Each structure stands twice: as structure tokens, then as C-alpha cells.
Amino acid sequence: MSDATLPLVYLNGRFLPPDEARIPVMDRGFLFGDGVYEVIPCYGGRLFRLQHHLQRLDSSLRAIRMQNPLAHDQWQALLEKLVQQLPGADQSVYLQVTRGSTGQRDQAIPAGVAPTLFCMTQPAVYPDPDTLVRGVSAVTRPDIRWQRCDIKAITLLANVLLRSEATELGAAEAILIRDGNALEGAASNLFMVRDGTITTPPKSAHLLPGITRDLVIELAAAHHLPFREADIPVAELQQAEEIWITSSSREVTAVVELDSRPVGNGTPGPIYRRMTGLYGDYKQRLQTPDDVT
Ligand code: PDD
């Protein structure tokens, strides 16, 4: 295996160079966005919260009426083999399952079709240290997505448009508003701090149950930080002392400017700094003993 071909991708049972990985044009993932995905960080060779990601994959597949083509231990073996290609590098692993191809374009769900399994890994692109120290800006946008945002579907056109609008406005993320409430980012979950209490919207069909979100909640509970799950009316978000966004790729990032106005004093706040410290410690522990997953 030459360096030029690294890292190989996985497609339907084979590891091969990305340029040689091909899917039929009739694949329902290609035609309809009919599939689901996961993004899993890998730190120090270990897949971060793998079981949580695989459970969410199960729920997404169940919601789109597909069976998981692999058992959890088979996924683990496959993904571990994939990440071994980049020894020592922190990585971002992507996996996707689509409903495959019948050779015809018909929206109705076909029976007995082999799914398409695709996985790849790339070196992790972290928020750079400057971003973590200074924070990012965000803009609010009407949530134009569908009613099942809890499914990690590959159908991401609305997210693509929303994120692009944010980028055009010089912001790192779009915070999505539905029925007067802020729900999550276009590719991240949302937290705010008001009167010293951390708040995140409760899980619902209108947001993705983020793995990073769950970890932040666990860390807040374990370290007795005031926390609640509650709706975040946009007017409250505008008065937040702190706003954070979380995801597998952004980890916990402070939003210091919302719709061109400073959040708090315009720098990452003290509770944010506490949480990123706890998050960093957790990541560190993950890479040594076997006591966390
Ligand atoms: N997105 N909400 C949305 C809409 C997301 O797309 C994501 C992650 C999250 C955070 O979930 P997690 O903590 O499990 O990464 C919340 C991934 C990273 C992506 O699409 O690339």
C-alpha cells in the first residue's frame, strides 16, 4: 500500500482507493438522498463513543425502515481496520448506509435490496486553538428543514443552504429557529448559559440527538454545573451570557457574536472554559485506561 493511495475507503465489503470506489447511478442514496450516516471522531486510535454512535445509527435506520446491515461488533471491526490506516492521527470517520439500487427510479421502498455501505476516514480538522480561545460568530435563520431532524439522514440540502447563508454573512454557523424557539445549528447542537444555568433544548423530532450534546450533559451532571433541558425562545438566546455549539467535529465551541451583536462580553465565558476543560480531560482519559467509552 503506497502513501499515495492512503487512506483507503470502504465500499460494500472492499477497501479501495477513493478514486476506484464506484456506486451505480441508480443508487437511492444518489437519486433520493435515501440513506443515513454517522460522523465519529477517533482520538489516539480509539473511536470516540462508538457504541453511542452505533445506537444512533440503529435509530436512524429504524426510522427509515431499514435493517442495520452489520452487527455492532462487525461495525467496530470494520471501523477499527479503517482507522488503522492513519496510525497516531486523530481522525474523523464517516459512514453511510443507503437503500441501494433496484435499477429503477421509483420512490416506493423496494423489498429485498442490498444496501450500499460506504466508510471513509480523514485526519481530524479541529477548531484551531485561536477559534477555541476567541469563539465564533453565528446568525439565526428560520429552520427550513423537515419534521424528522432526529434522523441523521444524508438528505442535507436545507443544512447546506443554511450553512452557506451563514458563511456568506461571515458566520461560522446558522442557529435554526422554529416556532420562536432556537433548536440547534445547521450541523451542531445548541447550548446557552443564562443566570449561570446551562440550557439546551430537549430532544425532539426537530433536532439531532447529538453524541457531543449527551457528553456535555453528562459532564455538567458529574461536575454539578447547573443544567436544564428546556426550550430556548429566541428572545432568551439574544440575552444569553454564553452560547455554545457542539458537534463531533467542532467539539464545544463558543459563539461570541449572534446576529452581529456580542454574546455576553463578546469572549468565551467562564462556564464555557470550565466545560472545555472537562471535555479535554475526558478525551485525555479516553486515550489511556479502558474506563470510558
Ligand atoms: N453533524 N445537529 C446537526 C444538525 C448535526 O448535523 C450534527 C453533527 C449535530 C451534532 O451531533 P454530534 O455531536 O453527534 O456530532 C447536531 C456532523 C458532525 C456532520 O454532519 O458533519
Image (tube, helix red, strand yellow):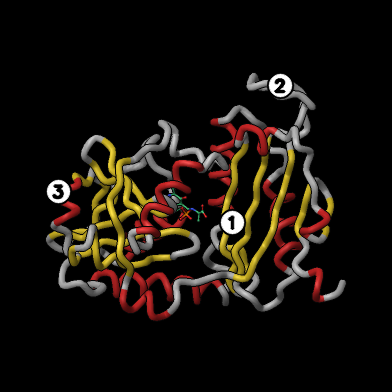
Asked if ligand 1 lies within 8 A of label 1, the reply is no
220 sits left or right of 78 in the view: left
Element class at badge 1: helix
Residue receiving disc 1: 50
The quadrant of the rendering that contains the C terminus is bottom right
The quadrant of the rendering that contains the N terminus is bottom right
Residue receiving disc 2: 110
The image shows residue 49 at horizontal and vertical percentages of: 54, 58
2 or 3: tag closer to the N-terminus: 2
Q: Residues within 10 Å of mark 2 (few under 14, many from 20)?
A: few
Tell me the kind of residue under disc 3.
Answer: Ala
Q: Can you say whether 274 is above or below 145 in the image?
A: below
Query: Which of the 4 image quadrants contains residue 142?
Result: top left
195 sits left or right of 48 in the view: left
Residue receiving disc 3: 235
Looking at the picture, tell me which residue is in the foreground, 88 or 120.
Answer: 120
- Between marks 3 and 1 in the image, the one whose residue lies nearer the viewer: 3
Residue sitting at the far front = 168
Q: Does the CB distance between marks 1 and 2 fall below 8 Å?
A: no
Element class at badge 2: loop
Q: Does the CB distance between marks 3 and 1 fall below 8 Å?
A: no
Query: Which of the 4 image quadrants contains residue 124?
Result: bottom right
Looking at the picture, tell me which residue is in the foreground, 225 or 212.
Answer: 212
Q: Residues within 10 Å of mark 1 (few under 14, many from 20)?
A: some
The image shows residue 179 at horizontal and vertical percentages of: 24, 35
The image shows residue 23 at horizontal and vertical percentages of: 78, 43
**At 67% across and 62% down in the image, what residue appears?**
121
**Inter-mark Cα distance, 1 to 2:** 30 Å
Asked if ligand 1 lies within 8 A of label 3, the reply is no
1 or 2: tag closer to the N-terminus: 1
Query: Which of the 4 image quadrants contains residue 195?
Result: bottom left
